[in-house]
Image: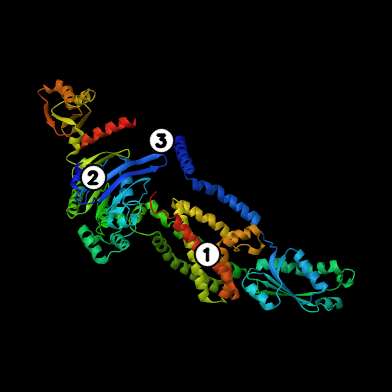
Amino acid sequence: MRRGFSLARISAILTKEFIQMRRDRMTFAMMIGIPIMQLILFSYAINSDPRHLPSAIIDRDHSAFSRAVVTAFANSTYVDFIMAPQTPEEAEKAMLAGKINFIFEIPEHFGRDIARGTRPQMLIIADATDPSAASGALAAAGEIINTGLAREFSTALASLATGPPPVEVVLQRRYNPAGITQYNIIPGLLGIILTMTMTLMTAVALTRETERGTMENLLAMPARPLEVMVGKVLPYVLVGYIQIIVVLNAGRFLFDIPFEGSRLLFFWISTLYIVVNLLIGFLFSTVARTQMQAMQMMVFLLLPQILLSGFMFPFRGMPGWAQVIGEVLPATHYMRLVRGIMLKGSTRFDLIADIWPLIALIVVISALALARYRRTLD
Amino acid sequence: MTLQTDSAEQTPAIDVRGLTKIYGKRTVVDHFDLRVPKGAVYGFLGPNGSGKTTTLRMICGLLKPEGGSGTCLGWDVIEQSDRIKTQVGYMTQRFSLWEDLTIAENLDFVARMYGLDNRKDRVKTALKTLGLYERKNQLAGTLSGGWKQRLALSACMLHDPKLLLLDEPTAGVDPKARREFWETIHDLSDQGVTILVSTHYMDEAVQCDFIAYIAYGKKLIDGPSGEIARKIGLSTWKVEGPGLGALSKALKTTPGVEQVARFGTSLHISGPDKAALEAAIAPWRDKKELVWTPVTSGLEEAFIHLMKEVKDNFA
């Protein structure tokens, strides 16, 4: 036997590691899949200068001037006017529900006042729960109006070229007037923390039994899949509650995050979200063969939940395909719900569009997990 | 067959036919027929990987057979495994209770899974019978091999099963614990519990009422344990004296001798053909220092004989 440093032994270990790596197909797939996913998500889906944010326009003037301004905003690609409500209340409701980021309101006699040079006011209400989503469009607003008007009326309004801007833009940053980013981050973080820990807890639920050999005993006893699933999921709901309490109190005492809405509603939607994540974890553990694989699957799901849910980057600023994926992710809906309840004081009627997806996910994932659950050792 | 006449008046505890399990291209259990009368101790013998565990798992619904049919405790093995599970106690080959639960917690969990009444009393009684009542709060993982095995047996009997499936229950257990274990098995059998037990040990096999010998997923023979050797029709001579090592070597290559095995200070020489065997040993019969006696073939000789035949078939 050779003593001391041996290249032969190193190569023996190295060969063994390679063989094992090759046998674990899932790990291999993840090693290739995760970088590709990151590359695509980071480079295509993320846009720190969000465009095409859904907006409402209330035009009370209906003049050539107001239409020119609206067109200018639409052409700027910062906003897409998806609704033209008759009343401000209607627009406000849409904003509470998180359907629009901006409300543009053009007052009566807008065109006349521009022509007279009396500088009419134009109101832009921004949903500032996510300050970064609002900033781009707001910063460019004055310039957009000027160029829009100039293109149409350069000859008629000589004063536009010189002098003060023809329109006075009034900005309202709704829900987060100071534009504090923590207001946006903390509720989002809650969603990410919960998805990370909850999924992990149950992801190893069955694989642990398999790896320790206790699965054989569990299966030999008369237990139905639903009983196993509910029994494995429920204890961690309590863990989820504890995490919520910790994060909320930290948010409140460290960052002064407001809590405008109903705590009861918050409790219910959080319960839904926790259960969704626990069920996803359980589903993973019915698919994975080892705890390691289950954890890799969790990481695989965590990435899009962080990047495409509106946590790191404004959701409405992402390309369409990324938004479609985002809509399927539970974190997306939970963040909207939490931001809505905490910052906007939204009620369950405002938020129904984001509540039912969570319920639907619970149903679908449970069904998948129960279908996948192996009742035998095959 | 003797087996069937014995149990004709009763429906057998296990009655399966053509049980087949295939993994990929490998047939692990091949058209397995098994009939276990109620209250019998039925031994499964066979080398490692012969399909003993797989067969046990199919009977208790842990594996889905690719083919075959039959009943276990009157219920369909394929369709009604939920019902079977409530009446069967299955002791796995590897310790499969929860090592991070205490002894008492493990038993309590099992009792709850079977929905037993008087749970606390049952667990307490089990702990006392087991002799672990004082150590009930010890983690199961910290128990020694023998105690783990007894705990596992106790756990799988908690719900008073009508059928016990024991997969190599005495592997790695010391001789004293093994003897105690078999006493328990016979007590249970007397109480009417049917026991299907797989084992490697010949001394355990003789304790069974019936034996089935399995190799390569096929049942080679089955019947009452006392009749197996006779059924095979093997003759055996015992020889005692000095120089057995050389004798053993010489006899192994002699035609008519199938196997030569050392039993303590003696050799057992066996062959399927009585006349050929006697002819083979004739040159040594006259030696004064050697004592030759004809003996009844044991189970071990019978099974080694079976294995040799099978190997030829599979070569």
Q: Amino acid at mark 2?
A: Gly
Q: Residue furthest front?
A: B9
Secondary element at image label 1: helix
Q: Nearer the viewer, residue B68 or B102?
A: B68
* C-alpha separation, residue under disc 3 versus residue under disc 1: 63 Å
**Which residue is identified by label 1?**
A360
In the picture, residue A334 is in which quadrant?
A: bottom right
**Nearest-to-viewer mark from 2 and 3:** 2
Q: CA distance from mark 2 to mark 3?
A: 50 Å
Report the chain holding disc 3: A
Residue A210's x, y, as percent? 39, 52
Residue type indicated by callout 1? Ala
Residue A31 visible in the snapshot = yes
- Frontmost of labels 3 and 1 is 1
Give the answer, above or below, for where A99 lies relative to B9: below
- Image spot of residue A149 (x, y percent): 83, 69
Under circle 2, the secondary element is strand
Q: Name the residue located 23 percent from the left edge and 28 percent from the top edge.
A: B258
Which amino acid type is shown beneath numbered disc 3? Arg
Q: Are marks 2 and 3 on the same chain?
A: no
| Subunit that carries the residue with mark 2 | B
Question: Horizontally, is A244 left or right of B300 in the view?
Answer: right
Residue under numbered circle 3: A3
Q: Position of residue A173 (x, y in %)?
A: 67, 74
Is residue A187 at all visible to an observer of this figure?
Answer: no
Q: Which residue is mark 2?
A: B43
Q: Percent position (x, y) of residue A33?
A: 56, 49
Q: Quadrant of residue B31?
A: top left
Query: Disc 1 is attached to a residue of which chain?
Result: A
C-alpha span from label 2 to label 1: 52 Å
**Relative height, residue B286 to residue B219 (above, below):** above
* The one of A360 and A195 positioned closer to us in this rendering: A360
